[in-house]
Amino acid sequence: MKISDGTRTYLERKRALGLAYDSVEFALRAFCRFTGDVPLEEVTTRHVLDFLNSRNSSTGTWRAKYRILRQFFEFSADRGTMPALLMPQGRLPDHQRFHSLIYTHTEIRAMIHATRGNQRNPLCAVNEETLRTVLLVLYGTGATTGEIFKLKCEDVDLKRRVMSVCGDRIVQPRQIPISNDVRSLLQKYLRSKERRIFGGAYVFVSTSGSPLRDHWMVNNFVRLRTRSGIMRFDATYRIPQMRDLRSTFAVHRIAAWIKEGADLNRMLPALSAYMGLSGVTAIERYLSLTPERFKNELNKLSPQKGRKHWRDDPALMKFIAEL
């Protein structure tokens, strides 16, 4: 049995159990293209290692691909379609501090402006208005990409200005208020000619009317980022990604509160709950990404003049712990 046949069998079995496995399919097909569609019994440890190291991927991405391949090979070996394969040594977790990229307002405007020329190819699975709206909703709500791609029409109440997001194994499901700008954006998109043609349960759909897929959006965003001229070259070289809009939302919100003189001891726990993070420590990682000019204000996040710090408020800590 060749890799492509094994992949097809594996995906059919998993999807029969109700699993989507879109990202798994993308990774396995990439492995098949990289090695060539050879018989499964000819796959070696060297094939796997060369594939995993073929791109300058983050530790998280490397380990995710490693896990996908390991589970696929174990499935195939259990069914006798290939011998047991000795996987290469796994990469250790990256224990460095939280890394994310924060887009400037100029970069966000450049990306939004570039969506027009980015989607001119008639073969694009995502049209200009869909890509533009997804980017603005991500930046305007701080939701994860998975939450936005899975968003259904029934999850959006434009009259009450609230949106229900599903969460995942890390981010809590929640109902969040949306701004007037985001409401108008969604209203305009849902009423657009392209969107009304397809209808369907999901808010954002492809040019064929099907729900968005991760790899479609990733490919479109890579092209958009290149067209916008957005690059990063620093000691931790990290490629800008669509999911960085969530971090950008958090940091821009914190920076705006500092400018407004808001009490961060009250606002940070609220931001944590809004973003579906479990506990207040999760939101603190965004503080390290805040512009240097705000460091003095952030250093003041401690008890002073008889005022309690949020850490010292038992009722608040209990509420946050139960989120």
Image: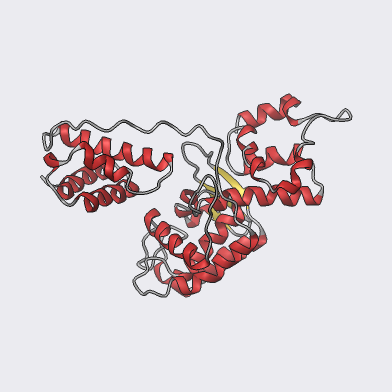
Q: Please tell me which residue lies in front, 190 or 226.
A: 226
Most extreme residue toward the right, as rendered?
A: 305
Q: Nearer the viewer, residue 298 or 11?
A: 298
Rendered residue at 73%/41% (across/down) = 267
Q: Position of residue 58 (x, y in %)?
A: 43, 43
Q: Position of residue 259 (x, y in %)?
A: 79, 51
Q: Is residue 194 left or right of residue 162?
A: left
Residue under the image location 56 percent in, 38 percent down = 98
Q: Is residue 187 visible?
A: no
Q: Position of residue 240 (x, y in %)?
A: 51, 54
Asked which quadrant contains residue 300, the reply is: top right
Front-most of residues 311 and 194: 311
Coloring basis for residues: secondary structure
Q: Is residue 162 above or below residue 197?
A: above
Q: Quadrant of the N terminus?
A: top left
Instruction: Say which residue appears at 24% left-offset and 45% top-offset.
Output: 11
Count of residue discs? 0
Residue that appears at 81% across and 29% down? 303
Whole-percent x, y for residue 173 in the image: 53, 41
Query: Does 81 appear above or below 303?
Result: below
Q: Is residue 286 visible from the viewing direction of this image?
A: yes
Considering the image in quadrants, where does the C terminus appear?
Answer: top right
Residue 262 found in image quarter: top right
- The front one of 103 and 206 is 103
